[in-house]
Image: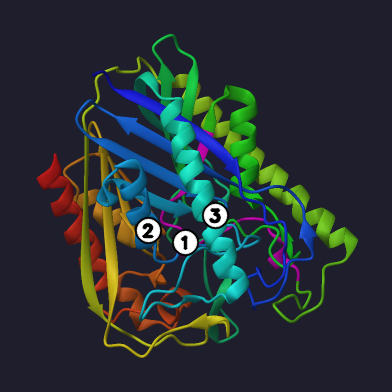
Amino acid sequence: MAFTAGAAKVDITPADLTALNPIGGTSFVGVHDPIHVRALVLHDGVSEVALISADLIECGDMRPLRARIEAELGIPAAHVMITATHTHNAPRLGTVSPGALAHNGGPESAAYTGWVFDQVLAALRAARAAARPARFGISSGHAAINVNREMYADGGWRLGYNLDGPTDPRVWVLRLASMAGDPIAVVANYAVHSTVALWTREVSGDLAGAAMRHVEEMIGGVAMFTPGALGDQNPRVSLEGFAGGFGPHGRMPTEAERAFAYAAVAAQGLVLGAEVVRVAGGIGELVPEVRLRAAEEVVPCPVKKGRDVLASMVQAEVDSVDLRLSLILIGDVALAGVSGEVTTTVYRRLAARSPLARTILVSIANDRIGYLPADEAFDRPVHSVNGCPIVRGHAEPGIVDGLSRMIREAS
């Protein structure tokens, strides 16, 4: 059996917005643009893997959904990687894992989760039905629309605009096409929070959604965004830049501020999307023979209490929290999934340690337990440390040592 690929996109815009805004536990006031789940199914004749990305703020514990995928479609749970684009103008999915620092949801969120699970299965079935012999290629580019957000000012650390902080402007682009060259899918990976229009309280795919719409318009097929090491990365331009008293219980933006927010979404989405299109178009010969492998490991880590986090964040009283590591190898390309928001320095160390030069980190993979900073960051009360649920000395080595070994063993 030849290497095959199929992709599909399904709308997951909620019909009822009541209590689905996880930032502050409020309701959205409207829908600016629809949100979607995108699914990619690959088969090499022996192994089948699935990559799923949803326009949501976060995906909690995805074990129930992955178990359902295995039961109904036969794709092993360890071969399924589910992530969120991390748009903050969208609901969350799933339950909060014990010990994790994540936004909680009520019965409305649980009902929405059940419905989205159905849509994910529908997307996977459609992707499988559309699967055909395919060719694969990869390259990378550069988009300078992210900036380190952990800033020291006025005698303390806060979220801001730190031009001297570590950042990663690389854009990874994976392209899948039919044997005749017809587009199947483009997978983009970039490190940025999709928070440009945060506080408008309208459902939106935000920056990532705008970028992928552009790619689909220009190339065709399905364009999928996966979040890189975004734990300390904000968009360069956002509504948060206004000193306007926004927040879960603050004032609504004015019409001028709202217009600015969505103009900034469109502009930065165009920059990122155009770079993905450019890189995809420049990928040389696509290869038709690709070997697939997948693996998963769980690393129990001692719990650290969160500090100065939003009231909508919850953290159970437990001794340990599970750090989930996921791996999908597409030829010599490693998609390295981590169940939290990894920061730039941790990814740099993983990339340096990995036996594969093309190691792509996917944050919020199969769960979101909180931020996952480098060990030395714990010397400062920065946002990623305050929101990290793991005691110093466990998250970074768990990620770097664990994933580099998993990649080595699977290669």
- Amino acid type indicated by mark 1: Cys
In the rendered structure, the answer to whether residue 372 lies left or right of residue 197 reads left
Check the image and name the residue furthest to the left.
Answer: 409
**Screen quadrant of the N terminus:** top left
Q: Return the residue nearer the eye: 375 or 332.
A: 332
Mark closer to the chain start, 1 or 3: 1
Q: Secondary structure at mark 3?
A: helix
Q: Secondary structure at mark 2?
A: loop
| Percent of width and height locating residue 148 | 50, 62
Check the image and name the residue furthest to the bottom.
Answer: 317
Q: Is residue 97 magenta?
A: no
Residue 59 — which label?
1
**Screen quadrant of the C terminus:** top left
Q: Secondary structure at mark 1?
A: loop
Q: Quadrant of residue 161?
A: bottom right
Mark closer to the chain start, 3 or 2: 3
Residue 366 — which label?
2
Mark closer to the chain start, 1 or 2: 1
In the rendered image, the vertical position of residue 38 relative to residue 388, given as above or below:
above
Q: Return the residue nearer the eye: 165 or 195.
A: 195
Check the image and name the residue furthest to the top.
Answer: 180
In the rendered structure, the answer to whether residue 170 lies left or right of residue 106 reads left
| Residue at horizontal 40 percent and vertical 82 percent from the top | 380
Spatial CA distance of label 1 from label 2 is 7 Å
| Residue at horizontal 36 percent and vertical 90 percent from the top | 317
Q: Are marks 1 and 2 in contact (CB under 8 Å)?
A: yes
Residue segment shown in magenta = 223-242
- Amino acid type indicated by mark 2: Asn
